[in-house]
Image: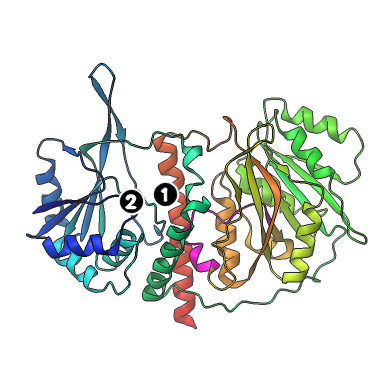
Amino acid sequence: MKFFTLPGRVCRTADIRAIAEQAEGKYTLISLKPDIEWVLFSEERMTALMDDSGAVMGYADHFNKMVHEDGTWSATQAPVIDYQLGALRDDFDFGSVMMFRTDALRKAVAEMDVEYEYAGFYDLRLKVSRLGELMHINEFLYYDVELDTRKSGEKLFDYVDPKNRGVQIEMEQCVTRHLKDIGGYLAPQFKSVDLKAGDFEYEASVVIPCKNRVKTIGTAIRSALSQKVNAPYKYNVIVVDDNSTDGSAEVIKDIVAEGHDNLVYIAQDKTWHAIGGNWNMAFHHPKCGRFAIQLDSDDMYYDETTVQQFIDAFHTQNCAMVVGTYQLTDFNGNPLPPGVIDHKEWTPDNGRNNALRINGLGAPRGFYTPLLRQINFPTTKYGEDYAVGLRVSREYQIGRIYNVVYNCRRWDENSDANCDVEAMNRNNLYKDRIRTWELQARIAMNKKA
């Protein structure tokens, strides 16, 4: 068995070919980092489990090793998650070490007919996944050195950084070919939507779910209330407080007491709602407008034209959902890198296929309320909007606004600012599960067609 090191998850097809040509023995080990230290007898353990399971690839939990200035070292656990049909993110974390069955590795490489500059490893693992099981060994088998020590919130936007655009284009090409091969690709054919259906007092509603955001909920509401829309359109603001205990409810009530005719306040009962359940309460409310537009309780609209831009986009693009463009700012509204996030990887023809690869669709999001009332949000506090976006895109076109309409404020109290590994794994596992469900539905729909 030979051990090879790649320069990282982003690599050339030529690098993968070179490994396949030199591979010997039943199994081939590939590492994404150089200095790997095995736990005693772990290589033997990995090989035995590959033999027993018949898997085509194995990967394992591990330890992150940190060497201190005084020469001592410490280690933290770094578990990874199970692979599944919808685990299509190109940044799926296998850890640093993967053991491939050599015959499967060579077969996958033989099927590579595109020479990628960046998507070589991504292409390999997608092709190998069609040959058999990618087995997660939930045992800690080795030590590596964690090179990226940034907080989770700082890593969150790497894939939409403009400097990585070339990488993203190749990754999209790669996943599109994979979806075609497994029957999950959707051609650019969409159902039409009747935007005149239903009787709505308001053309649009700004929906603000809230849970313990006393420092930001006031500015979020006032940002929504400051919007200007053109006659004959009217809009309102629906704030849903989910049993806040930090004074957020009092802030909301104080603004309600000012007498805003277009402000609706919903106080949830004590049962489980999460963000998805709060959205469900808002768009099923009789005062909800024809279009429901997102505003998170710790963010703000860019200016007073955001709601009108969404109304215009729905009508001119005749779509069931619209996604805007946002800029990252600090708590005080000062721009942060990488700056403007426009998600231009979304294209009318292929956006809904590429959506199975990326970890989000952008913000803010606007939804056509009659369709939303049929689909509903999952009652979760993470990934709920992504699930709805995938479901909508299965049948309907999603429109885009490429002007900046939203300030996404990053600060220490964001829910994803500094997640530990357990929280990150839980979130990623759920989003992969959402992709799996959606991919299964698309494959079944294609078979039926």
Q: On screen, 156 above or below 312?
A: above
* Residue 331 image point, x, y percent: 66, 32
Amino acid type of disc 1? Leu
Amino acid type of disc 2? Asp
* Residue 173 image point, x, y percent: 42, 68
Q: Quadrant of residue 180?
A: bottom left
- Tag 1: Cα neighbours inside 10 Å, few (<14), some, or many (≥20)? some
Task: Decide if residue 287 is on the left or right side of residue 232.
Answer: left
Closer to the N terminus: mark 1 or mark 2? 2
Secondary structure mostly taken by the magenta-highlighted segment of the chain: loop
**Residue at mark 2:** 82
- Tag 2: Cα neighbours inside 10 Å, few (<14), some, or many (≥20)? some
Image disc number at residue 318: none
- SS for dot 2: loop
Q: On screen, 15 above or below 349?
A: above
Is 354 contained in the magenta span? yes
**Residue at mark 1:** 429
Mark 1 to mark 2 CA distance (whole Å):
8 Å
* Image quarter (top left, top right, bottom left or bottom right) of the N terminus: bottom left
Is 434 contained in the magenta span? no
**In the rendered structure, which segment of residues is drawn in magenta?**
351-365
User: Is 53 in front, or is 400?
Assistant: 400
* Residue 56 image point, x, y percent: 20, 61
Task: Decide if residue 188 is on the left or right side of residue 305.
Answer: left
Q: Quadrant of residue 88?
A: bottom left
- In this orientation, does residue 273 appear? no
Residue displayed at 43% across by 54% down: 432
Residue displayed at 60% across by 65% down: 392
Mark 1–mark 2 CB contact (< 8 Å) = yes
